[in-house]
């Protein structure tokens, strides 16, 4: 089935050949075509160009989008969407003065979510998570990475990863799974961290690999959670199963997690609220994508990732939500690009590049997602009538989305 979209006010993020990623100064450039058409066939982008040069074709359906813009769907490369229950009580506790760290020390935080998840059936967990998948698709996300890590036992981690697998089978959105092997130390291993890490490596990891439940490996490399040495041990074990690292680093403290990630050819290093000059240096000449999560900074009132320092150093940057019950109960990529512009001083072009092509790279799907390019998936957002694409981040808190197409189908 061939569908032609005509009179597109501006077709955004077009490319003739898929780029791997967009780096440094190039991030200021967002290629567009004004007064354009877009042709899709089934789930694939077939052609696009200026209205004046529209070819004569046999078309099944024409959709006139006068006044509206089209851009690729968001690529959200870092989430924890599969979780049970919520943590709004901790939100209130933080308003009343407790810190995220204090809440975690008192048995709340990740351990709270883990208890909840362990007591939730796989079906129930699936239903709770499916609601969030539908919600993010409506907000324009066409590809998403989802992590495990709220299980903390073999049984519960496999339950999470099986739910991720089923969501991927049942929804048109592309889903990439990450085994977040070490997220917090469970109570049963309170004084036995090495015992927990050995259990993860010797019991859970082989099963995850055997069942093909994840492509990526993650560790929360952070003071009070897992050290660089712990991280290295887990990444080394995972490399034997070809799981590529995408790791949580530099959220509260800079302890060398980025260097460890780069050494193991991490696809991405994520969070980066605390960045030393040597951390930026370590990313140069690497294939590792730095990923910022501004809605986490917003929700926890912690520093924002120094995007200007990173981009001005000639590095790429991707933006993602971190959607999870503790630090970011929101999967809204529209809010993420807006916050990146307002709080991290990224210009709209940089934010859109970071949330599309660079986000796709951070999930290993840049050949099929992240831009309007012939042969890529027919994944795109049709905006409402807006004056310019900068209006999207400018009008923070609003999503000026008219329709979302994923794999050629309207959501
Ligand atoms: O990315 N930092 C580690 N993990 C999550 C939050 C975990 C939680 O509080 O449930 C994050 O922010
Ligand atoms: Fe996270």
Image: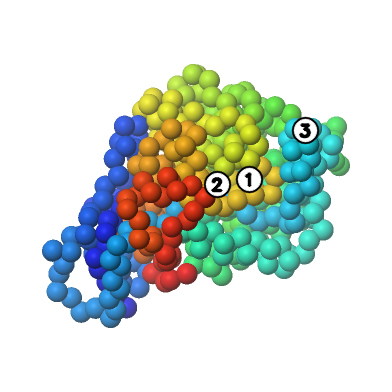
Around disc 3, counting alpha carbons within 10 Å, would you say few (fewer than 14), some (14 to 19), or many (20 or more)? few
Nearer the observer: mark 3 or 1; the answer is 3
Q: Secondary structure at mark 1?
A: loop
Tag of residue 321: 2
Disc 3 to disc 1, C-alpha distance: 18 Å
Q: Is residue 81 above or below residue 97?
A: below
Q: Is residue 232 shown left or right of residue 98? A: left
Q: Please tell me how many numbered marks the rendered image carries.
A: 3
Q: Is residue 305 shown left or right of residue 234? A: left
Around disc 2, counting alpha carbons within 10 Å, would you say few (fewer than 14), some (14 to 19), or many (20 or more)? many
Q: Is residue 14 above or below residue 47?
A: above
Residue 224 in view, yes or no: yes
Which circle's residue, 3 or 1, is located before the other in the chain?
A: 3
Mark 3 lies on residue: 97
Tag of residue 328: 1
Q: Residue 259 or 141: which is nearer the viewer?
A: 141
Where does residue 159 sit, x and y in percent of width and height? 71, 59
Where does residue 59 sit, x and y in percent of width and height? 24, 78
Marks 2 & 1, CB-CB < 8 Å contact: yes
Which circle's residue, 3 or 2, is located before the other in the chain?
A: 3
Q: Residue 320 or 126: which is nearer the viewer?
A: 320
Q: Secondary structure at mark 3?
A: loop
Q: Residue at x 36, y 46 (%)?
A: 390
Q: Residue at x 29, y 79 (%)?
A: 61
Mark 1 Cβ and ligand 1 under 8 Å apart: yes
Which circle's residue, 2 or 1, is located before the other in the chain?
A: 2
Q: Quadrant of the N terminus?
A: bottom left
């Amino acid at each position: 089935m061939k569908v032609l979209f005509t009179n597109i006010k501006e077709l955004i993020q077009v490319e003739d050949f898929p780029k791997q990623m967009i780096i440094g100064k190039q991030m200021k450039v967002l290629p567009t075509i004004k007064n354009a058409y877009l042709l899709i066939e089934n789930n694939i982008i077939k052609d696009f160009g200026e209205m004046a040069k529209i070819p004569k074709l046999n078309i099944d359906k024409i959709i006139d989008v006068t006044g509206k813009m089209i851009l690729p769907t968001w690529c959200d490369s870092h989430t924890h969407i599969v979780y049970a229950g919520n943590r709004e009580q901790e939100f209130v506790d933080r308003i009343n003065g407790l810190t995220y760290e204090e809440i975690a020390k008192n048995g709340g935080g990740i351990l709270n979510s883990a208890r909840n998840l362990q007591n939730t059936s796989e079906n129930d967990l699936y239903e709770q998570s499916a609601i969030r998948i539908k919600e993010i698709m409506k907000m324009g996300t066409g590809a998403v990475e989802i992590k495990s890590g709220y299980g903390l036992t073999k049984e519960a981690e496999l339950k999470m990863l099986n739910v991720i697998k089923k969501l991927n089978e049942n929804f048109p959105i592309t889903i990439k799974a990450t085994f977040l092997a070490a997220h917090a130390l469970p109570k049963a291993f309170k004084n036995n961290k090495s015992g927990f890490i050995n259990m993860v490596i010797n019991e859970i990891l082989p099963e995850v690999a055997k069942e093909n439940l994840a492509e990526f490996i993650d560790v929360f490399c952070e003071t009070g959670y897992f050290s660089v040495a712990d991280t290295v041990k887990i990444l080394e074990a995972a490399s034997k199963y070809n799981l590529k690292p995408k790791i949580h680093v530099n959220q509260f403290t800079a302890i060398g997690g980025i260097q460890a990630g780069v050494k193991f050819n991490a696809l991405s290093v994520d969070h980066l609220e605390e960045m030393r000059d040597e951390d930026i240096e370590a990313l140069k000449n690497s294939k590792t994508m730095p990923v910022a999560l501004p809605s986490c900074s917003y929700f926890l009132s912690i520093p924002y990732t120094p995007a200007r320092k990173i981009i001005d150093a000639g590095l790429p940057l991707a933006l993602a939500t971190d959607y999870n019950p503790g630090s970011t109960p929101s999967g809204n990529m529209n809010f993420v690009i807006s916050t990146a512009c307002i709080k991290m001083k990224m210009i709209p072009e940089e934010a859109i590049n970071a949330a599309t092509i660079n986000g796709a790279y951070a999930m290993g799907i840049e050949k099929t997602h992240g831009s309007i390019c012939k042969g890529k998936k027919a994944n795109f957002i049709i905006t409402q009538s807006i004056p310019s694409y900068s209006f999207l981040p400018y009008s923070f808190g609003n999503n000026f989305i008219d329709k979302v197409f994923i794999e050629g189908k309207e959501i």
